[in-house]
Image (cartoon, helix red, strand yellow):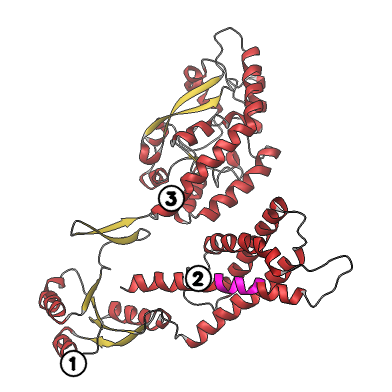
Amino acid sequence: MIDQRKRIFAARLWLLDLLLTAASFFLAYGFRLLFELEGRIVMPVQIYLPTLAIILPTWAIVLPLFGVYVESTFRSQEQIVRLLKAIGLAWLVSAAVQSFVNPDLPSRLILVFTLVINYALLFSHRLILSWTKKHSALGMRHVAVIGSGKGASEFARTIENHEDWGLRLAGIFKQADVRRILEAGGLDELIIVADRENLSEFNETFLLCEELGVTATVVLNFFPHSIARMELHELDGFPLLSFSTTPTNEALMLVRRVMDVVLSGVLIVVFLPVMLLVAAVIKLTSSGASGKVLFKQERSGLHGRVFTMYKFRSMVDNAEQLRFELEILNEMDGPVFKSSRDPRITGVGKLLRRFSIDELPQLYNVLRGDMSLVGPRPPLPQEVARYERWQRRRLSMKPGITCLWQISGRNEVNFEDWMKLDLTYIDNWSLLLDLKILLKTVPVVLLGRGAK
């Protein structure tokens, strides 16, 4: 119930933000009527409604991406900055779409006014919410905490800090007081903070709550975990408790997959002439008729599942057989092999590698679902076999063509820091982070930074 209220709060705030955004547009139109610019005629408001049709869905998508609904308090400077960045990007996207759809419509000044008014309204709205704390969509829900010790006190403090979710703490009570406070009435939910050893002592409490129609909730803080997120599900009546360190929002992962398919398909079409030219050059510069254009290699994918990865061949044909003879040239620590003096790399291959052109066939791997556009780089199975246990967690997300390591200097980063960068990506994953990495990859590739 508490988690549902948190989601309702965020959804309600999102809808109010969209209403305020629409209001900002109409206020901006009214404000624009006050200014007479030579050669600029303000047309009837209905002419500008297509602009509003661009603004609303853009705001609806961009605002959640910046995490402006993650926290329930809006007094922190971080929330102010998040909101400013989100509205700024939404405005830029709207202006770009407007210029593409109808560049002749003179509504740029209205868009500017909308930006300023919108930020003022959304920020003021958050200030009012933080001051009043009386905005629950479902009314106040009275809860009592049952337990003793530090755990019960900390959870009670959390309840007190979230009155904005419509929660009111009736107090902290011991197990002996349960029957009295339940029979006295007035409680909507009983929250039990118990140790694993004495959880069975609350059997009677659960039955009493069931009989009186009071929701009983158990704080499951006794299972060992440090970074895993805990989620409770149900399957045909069986309660399931899950611990996960990877993203579990199926809707967001579906959006990510759609983005992968659409963007990789577009990139294949855009780079098709380049890929055909590269294929021809590789074939023409090969020593014999058997020279292969593509290099196929088994790599470890999601959770270590092996798949075939494709690249343009940048080495001699028997490069795999020569690999173990060149260990002395390895410039990377850990189980991976990287060398700027690798004699197996062809003349054409050096150019392909410098600007990551050899990676373009991996767009096919993305279309197939073996890889994503963004994610930890796929390792060789023999490298994975030499991983330390904590390093294997980088396999818990689908591998990608680019990643934090790719934009952080690549081969200039030592192996342990590389692994930590991948784990940082997994722990902080969001669609916005993927977008940032993709955008930062462009200058890295064009400048050939960190490549060997």
At x 46%, y 25%, the residue is: 297
Visible residue check, residue 247 = no
Residue 44 located left or right of residue 39? left
Residue 413 rendering spot, x and y as whole percentages: 57, 43
Secondary structure category for the residue under label 2 = helix
Q: Which residue is mark 1?
A: 184
Sequence-first tag of 2 and 3: 2
Whether 21 is among the magenta residues is yes
Badge nearest the viewer, 2 or 3: 2
What amino acid does circle 1 point to?
A: Ala
| Label 1 – label 2 distance at C-alpha | 38 Å
Give the crowd class for mark 3: few <14, some 14-19, many >=20 residues within 10 Å: some
Whether 413 is among the magenta residues is no
Q: Quadrant of the N terminus?
A: bottom left
Residue 91 rendering spot, x and y as whole percentages: 67, 62
At x 60%, y 71%, the residue is: 21
Q: Which residue is mark 3?
A: 253
Sequence-first tag of 1 and 2: 2
Using the image, tell me which numbered label, if any, was put on residue 15.
2
State the extent of the magenta-drawn residues as a range: 18-25
Q: Main secondary structure of the magenta part?
A: helix
